[in-house]
Amino acid sequence: MKSALSLRFVFGLIALFFSCTMSRSQTVIPLWPDGQIPNDLKNRNIQEKIEVGNDGVLRISNIVLPTLSVYMPEKPTGAAVVICPGGGYRIEASGHEGVDVAQWFNSFGVTAFVLKYRLPDDALWANKHEVALQDALKAMQLVRSNATKYKVDPNRIGIMGFSAGGHLASTVSTHWQSAPSMTGLKNL
């Protein structure tokens, strides 16, 4: 009985932490607002899954609708960063590798955008190896095209990530010139 109460208490704290950190995002932007998501097989039998593991890690998987969560600092400096959480391209650890990092950047006046990108899945996407890169490139384009709205200097936008998200960020940094042919995006 005592261990069951302790377990409930721990999960209650985790849920409270999750709700508090997620509520700090002022805006969530759909990456593909027109519903024309590249490589979409339109299999909606698969639902997005959000869970907090026994280790306290927030995990998101089966991402069907990629988004950018905007974290505005109190005193913006004009700098911005797109954050790509890691997770081995199987899940995204969006708490400690997304929200927490965004809030840390905010403390320095940096506007942060946490990317919830699609993960490779044969059941959801054609050309599954391209979907995360398409989302990251689209995120950069959206941040740049909305720079004035978010008080960002379009020449001071970076991208970073952890683990698979770090791989994704480095791929954006080295493959941005091929983006128009792959995604039809402009103004990268």
Image (cartoon, rainbow, N blue to C red):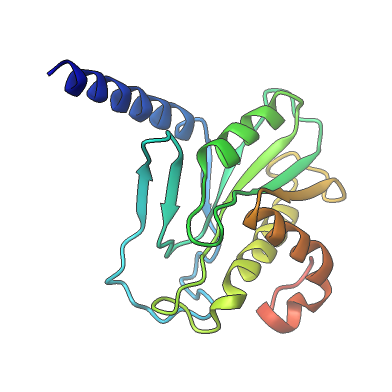
Q: In this rendering, would 153 be left or right of 20?
A: right
Q: Quadrant of the N terminus?
A: top left
Residue at 81% across, 37% down? 78
* Numbered-mark total: 0
Q: In this rendering, would 172 be left or right of 12?
A: right
Position in image of residue 94 (x %, y %): 52, 44
Considering only vertical position in the picture, is 107 above or below 57? above
Furthest toward the top, the residue is 2
Residue at 49% across, 70% down? 34
Position in image of residue 184 (x %, y %): 68, 79
Position in image of residue 182 (x %, y %): 69, 81
Q: In this rendering, would 77 be left or right of 91?
A: right
Seen from the viewer's position, the closer of residues 104 and 1 is: 1
Considering only vertical position in the picture, is 28 above or below 171? above
User: In which quarter of the view is residue 10 placed?
Assistant: top left
Q: Quadrant of the C terminus?
A: bottom right
Q: In this rendering, would 5 be left or right of 176?
A: left
Considering only vertical position in the picture, is 184 above or below 29? below
User: In which quarter of the view is residue 100 placed?
Assistant: top right
Residue at 30% across, 28% down? 11
Position in image of residue 166 (x %, y %): 70, 54
Residue at 80% across, 48% down? 157
Furthest toward the right, the residue is 155
